Amino acid sequence: MYDANGQTRPAYDDYCNWYEKQDSQWLKRKNAEADESFRRTGITFNVYGDDDAEERLIPFDMVPRIITAREWRKLTRGIEQRVKALNSFLYDLYHRQEIIRAGRVPERLFRQNDAWLPHMVGFTPPGGIYTHIVGVDLVRTGPDDFFVLEDNARTPSGVSYMLENRETMMSMFPDLFTDVQVESVSNYPRRLARSLAACAPLATEGKPTVAVLTPGIYNSAYFEHAFLADQMGAELVEGGDLRVVNGRVQMRTTRGYKPIDVLYRRVDDDYLDPLTFEPDSVLGVPGIMDVYRAGGITIANAPGTGISDDKAIYSFMPEIVEFYTGEKPLLPNVETWRCADKDSLAYVLDNLSELVVKEVHGSGGYGMLIGPTASKREIAQFRKKLEASPENYIAQPTLSLSTCPIYTKKGLAPRHVDLRPFVLVSPNGIDITPGGLTRVALKEGSLVVNSSQGGGTKDTWVLKD
Amino acid sequence: MLGRTANGLFWMSRYLERAENTARLLDAGLRMALTRDIATAQDEWRSVIATSGQQSNYEAVNDAYDGMSVWNFILRDKANPANVREMFGAVRQNARTARTNISSEVWEAVNESWMELDKMLTRPVSQGAVGDVVAAIRRAGTRVHGTLDGSMLRNEAYHFARAGTFVERGESTARILDMKYYLLLPSLSYVGSSLDSGQWDQVLRSVAGASGYTWLNAGQIDARGIVEFLVLDDRFPRSLAFCRRALRTNLDALAKLHGNDHPCNSLMRDADDHISDLTVDAIFEQGLHEFLVDYTNRNAAIAEAIGQDFRFLS
């Protein structure tokens, strides 16, 4: 919100004018109301292994994160380029592997990777689409400097917060939205439904039937699964509702079994089909992979897509983008040291207190070392793990991230944020809803924005021109 | 609609109705206990527990039938698998399962009611607070029924939810009547003799029928009148005849939506015809208890058939 000289950034001008006119007691009351409204609508997430707090709220901060139209246009070009490259990369990886033959990425990256599915080799998903829904995590270090921190192509979550945060802001501060012209995000579910339907397999008769597959009401993101199904007008199904009948995946309805054309699954690859993967899984559908390979259903995202979330693959994204698009990447990666390389490892070991070290296959902010805030003992312990299996780690510098203000009892205070726009991919093209999920590290000085570790969310505004 | 979702809607309503009926039973017990001597009050509390079907679970953890133990057992004790707190948890869980098929108004009514009650029932309920809890449970029922009525499409989802309500309500009224029938057996052998009006007043209260009965019968309390009212009077929304008719309406609507009849529809028609042909005399002739057992069995058979016809579980 403020630049290095303490001046308000242009994007925030209108908001600041509005904010300064508001009564501070009234704002305090509004802040308390927001929490209550989230609880009532049941927007909660479950925390595994925490019985006392079965359902928690992700804290919501009522100061929006604001992006100008110009900044957004620039971002979307970079995201489109990256997502296109990701799809081409996945296709290539499961077909001729040109990129490996060309020596641009090493073979070991996927050979020893659990997320790489041999079952997908030689098979092309309907429409050639692997990543139907992608969440690209971005951070910002300066006025025009956005970096990609992570690609989420496995099952990106959090889009319900993008939508509900906006709803909450609009009902809390209706006048604000007449003062400031903000791009709407509310049609995301319709765009999603359209995009998924456009990926229907050839076996589809008539209008495609789309369903959302959830692991069930105890899953941490169940609220989001139900919310999206509801907003799309799609059935929300569990493994127990589905069965392979006559070569199609069908759901048990009150009128008997009915075929599904597109399955937006929020269940991991491992649990998708007990006949192919985890034999004990009850979350999936026995035989769905056979139907899939025979062209009887579209699975979104495609099985085997998760490999592109791997942080070792991430470190090759600049090469990947260039290889498939023939262009320089518009969105840079954060500088990354692959600890599998000897020289890099030596550098990382020498500079542990300055770096962020992440597990290659990890997610959700677990299993990482944040050098600058870690104790000597933590660093020493991490050093041992790193030396034992260096190929499992990458390291990145701690960026001087830009901040956004949050509302605190003592007034506005700066905190670190990231941004996850949601990208839809279909044969009709790439569609990016102007907005996204802004996560914020609520603790002063903290860099970790994950909801499982004390992060919160904000409404994300893309201003109209 | 998914079979599992239909099951969720059906049971959301059943648990809600069950919680509400339990609250009414408790309310009637409270009132009775206040107006009687200690020994009679104990009997009353015992019958409240007996009606809820949890006598052995109660006696496993309690030595005596005092009000405080009874209402806490009914409302929140983990030793009681059918405590109201659990029931509301089940209402919410089923609503969550069916979240995509209920309106957000219904969901919010369920979720907010659950939040309120769960908070009230985290700690033991004192004498001063039990009335508030009962009122909150009744309010929850009213709110959910109201939002169902006012915000839901008249589609399958609505009819499954309503069917659950009337299956449960009919069963509850039959059970309460059957329980009191046993207690008052001697007086019933003289059909038409004057009764302990306090006992019957309680029965009427526990089905929210006290004032309705008074309006219709000018305060004249006798066994015939009460049986007629609770069983056959289809103006009274908790009578067996009313529940049956309402259940039939919803099952007919489902048959119409599906374009064909199911086994549950023919079971329903038989049961409905059976009760609409009955007179109070015929019921007494058959034996009230026998009649109620038959009613409950048919009710259970219909509920079972609904689950099978619409593929609730498989």
Image (cartoon, coloured by chain):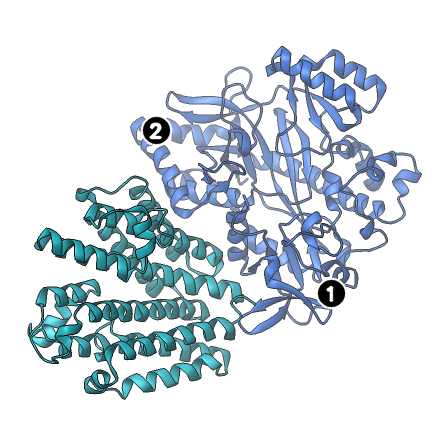
Name the tint of chain B in the rendering: cyan
Name the tint of chain A in the rendering: blue
Q: Nearer the viewer, residue A100 or A365?
A: A365
Going from the N terminus, do you reach mark 1 or mark 2 first?
Answer: 2
Which residue lies under the disc numbered 2? A21
- Image quarter of residue A322: top right
Q: Residue at x 40, y 66 (%)?
A: B161
**Separation (CA) of disc 1 from disc 2:** 58 Å
What is the three-letter code of the residue carrying label 1?
Gly
- Element marked by disc 2: helix
Q: Nearer the viewer, residue A116 or A102?
A: A116
- Image quarter of residue A234: bottom right
Q: Is residue B142 visible?
A: no
Q: What subunit carries mark 1?
A: A
Residue B181's x, y, as percent? 21, 71
Is A14 displayed left or right of B63 in the figure?
right
Q: Residue at x 10, y 80 (%)?
A: B192
Q: Nearer the viewer, residue A328 or A317?
A: A317
Residue A238's x, y, as percent? 59, 57
Which residue lies under the disc numbered 1? A296
